[in-house]
Every structure is written in C-alpha cells, then in structure tokens.
Amino acid sequence: MQTDLMQIFRDACAKKASDLHFLPQDGVCILYYRLDGALKEMERYNLAQYQEILTRIKGMSQLDIGETRLPQDGRIRLAIDSKNVDFRLATLPTIFGEKLTVRIMQPMNSHLSPEQIFTNPEDLANFKKTISHAFGLILFCGKTGSGKTTTAYTAIQELSKGQKLSIHSVEDPVEYTLPTVAQTQIQPKFGLGFPSAIRCVLRHDPDVLFVSEVRDQETMELMLKAVVTGHLVISSLHVSDSISAAQRLLEIGVSPYMAASALSTVVSQVLLRRVCKHCCEEVTLDEATALHFGILEGLKIKEARGCESCNHTGYRGRMAIYEFLHFTKAMKDMIRAQNITGLQDHLVVSGHKSLKDRAREAVVAGHTTIEEMSRLT
C-alpha cells in the first residue's frame, strides 16, 4: 500500500491538485482531488483498502494510529519528482470512519517575479505602487485558496531585494522560507501567540513586519500601532473584497481613527478557472443574461463543455483577478465616520474597478465563463 499511496501523491502533484479528500461512506471511501478550486472524484476504495492508506499515512506523519475518536493534524515532507513537497494532514471522525484531508504545498518558485504574477500591466503598476510606501498597512484579501499568500510572499520577496530593509514575519504556519527574512512560527502551547510574537519582533528594529493573518482585535491593534510609529505592515484577511476589509476592521473593534490612519492599500483577489480551449463552445449572449451581468447583448462568449484534456470539467488552469484599493484622504475620512455605504458609493462614482468588473472583463475576453464569474463574485 505504500507504493499505492506514493502513486496517489505523485499523480496529485502532476495534476496540480491543491488538496486530497478521502471521504468514507457506507462501504466505500471516495477520493477527491481539488483541481482548479473544484472537487473531482478520482477513485473509490473499499473501507479495508482505505484503512491501510490511513494507517500508513498516520505513521508517516507520526500521528497516533490508534486514535480514531479525536481530530488530528500532521505533516509530511516528501521528494516528488526531485522536489520537496509538504503534505499537511487533518483527520476528522465521521459516522463512517475518519475523513482524511491532505493539503499539498508544492514549493513556491523562489524566483517568482511580479511580472509573472501580474500579467496585466495595470495590475503590475498597482502592485509596484502598493509596495513603494515606506510605512502603512497593506492587506491582501481573499477567500481560502484564492492565492493571496503567494501574492503576499511576492511582495515580501520584492521588498527584501538588495537586503536594505530589516524584514520580520510572524506566521502560522510558515508557508515558505524566504532568504534574508527573519521568520517566526508562533507557538501558542508555549505562550508565543501572535500578540506576544509581534511585541518581541518590534524590539528588533524591523522596517517591514509581515503578519500572516489577522485573527483578533489585539493583533490588529498592535499592527496599527506599528504603522503609526513608522513601520510598513503587511498582512492578510479572509474577506471577499476590499470594502469588506475596511468593514471587518471596524467590526472587530478597531478604532475608526486608527484604522483610517493606518490603511494604505487593500489588495483583493479571486482565482477564476480558465475555460478549456480544447472543448469550449462559443455562444451568443441572450438579452436577459446580458442585462443581469452588465454585458452587451449579442456578444460572443465561451461556455464550458468537458473533454479528456480538462478531466471532463470544462476548465483547465486558473487565472487571478485583482482589486487594488489605494486609500485617499476622502476615503479615510469616510472610515473615520464609519460611513461604509458612502465609501461604496464613492468608489462607484470614481470608476473604481471591483472584482466583479474584472471578472466581467475576463468573460468578455474569452478567458472564463459567465457561470464561473457568477460562482466566485
């Protein structure tokens, strides 16, 4: 079974799956791959076969093989096609046995450049403007699996070039190692949480502080205090768009004055599945759909079908779309007044491009479909 398990891992990496889901059911275990953000059934095992897989993978990750009543977490690092790949495991008791989910963390290209991330010249210019500030708060936002971690690491990597800045990170977990960056993994069991780690880092004369995720009011307030004392602070939020980021700060109890003073730029992003070029079909947009999505009636757009090339999903690969919100004085005044509705209206009048606008552009350009735009925005 060891050979079978390694073959699963190799196949998943070759297909660029981001996660594996082993879901036990009545008499069978279904293996799903998450491909381009969507689950795809790949294999079925009887429960005896699955138990062998589960026992083997628990042993490899040093989990308790005999513990089936409580959730467990672990990780394995394996060499797959000459590359070190991290597999993060989580077990969960269900009525049919333990579900196993494996997150695949393939190595990030250490030479990943902004030009590779931002293929749109407008996005690239906005990114360079975002990281040009000497101090301020930069938030990268998006749902889980939206690629915001990769974008944030690209920003840190750019800032670290030339080794002219002292850059420290506080993370949970440390996703990738970055040269010339002092990265700290929090250890809550030993009293080193986000707040205590941030306080310690600020005593080490950082120019840039990267906090992997904002989870509570105390962490955010410490980050904002670092900003007002002259630091550049970068972090991420699990919100769907830029307006929601500003609103979230107020909802967790952050002072409107502090939030407005610190906010520099919010970058929100979504990964849209690209329609498969081998099997997509061109259709004419009808009046009702065009009106609903704000697209010209009669326009030719692509629809997904499905073929061998795309594993019969209709999609192959993904593309990122971005929303950059650079905070002006007028916008900061609205946050101080907690006028989120006014901020939304201001962005509409000013011609700001939202994620929905960028998704619409991708549909018109033939990169994705109306269904994909509707699903994610």
Image (cartoon, helix red, strand yellow):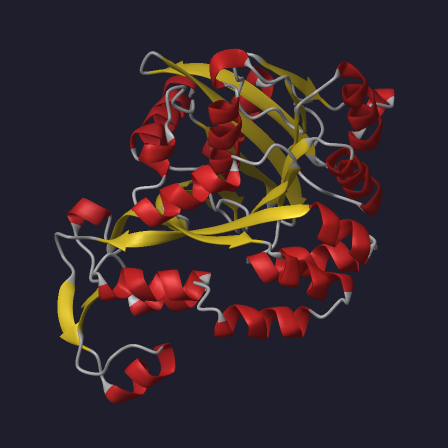
Q: How many numbered marks have been drawn onto this rendered protein structure?
A: 0
How far from the left and from the top, in percent, is residue 14? 29, 29
* Above/below status of 284 relative to 32: below
Towards the viewer: 8 or 345 = 345
129 to the left or right of 74: left
| Residue sticking out furthest to the front | 329
245 to the left or right of 60: right
Q: Residue at x 47, y 50 (%)?
A: 269
Give residue 285's quadrant in the image.
bottom left
* Above/below status of 331 relative to 310: below
How far from the left and from the top, in percent, is residue 133? 57, 36
How far from the left and from the top, in percent, is residue 43? 36, 41
| Residue sticking out furthest to the bottom | 287
Query: Is residue 35 visible from the viewing direction of this image?
Result: no
Towards the viewer: 48 or 5 = 5
* Above/below status of 229 relative to 353: above
Towards the viewer: 335 or 197 = 335
Q: Residue at x 56, y 28 (%)?
A: 88
Give residue 295's quadrant in the image.
bottom left
Query: Is residue 123 visible from the viewing direction of this image?
Result: yes
* Quadrant holding the N terminus: top left
* Quadrant holding the C terminus: bottom left
Q: Residue at x 57, y 75 (%)?
A: 345
| Residue sticking out furthest to the right | 191
How far from the left and from the top, in percent, is residue 16? 34, 35
Give residue 101's quadrant in the image.
top right
* Above/below status of 117 relative to 357: above
115 to the left or right of 278: right
Q: Residue at x 48, y 14 (%)?
A: 162
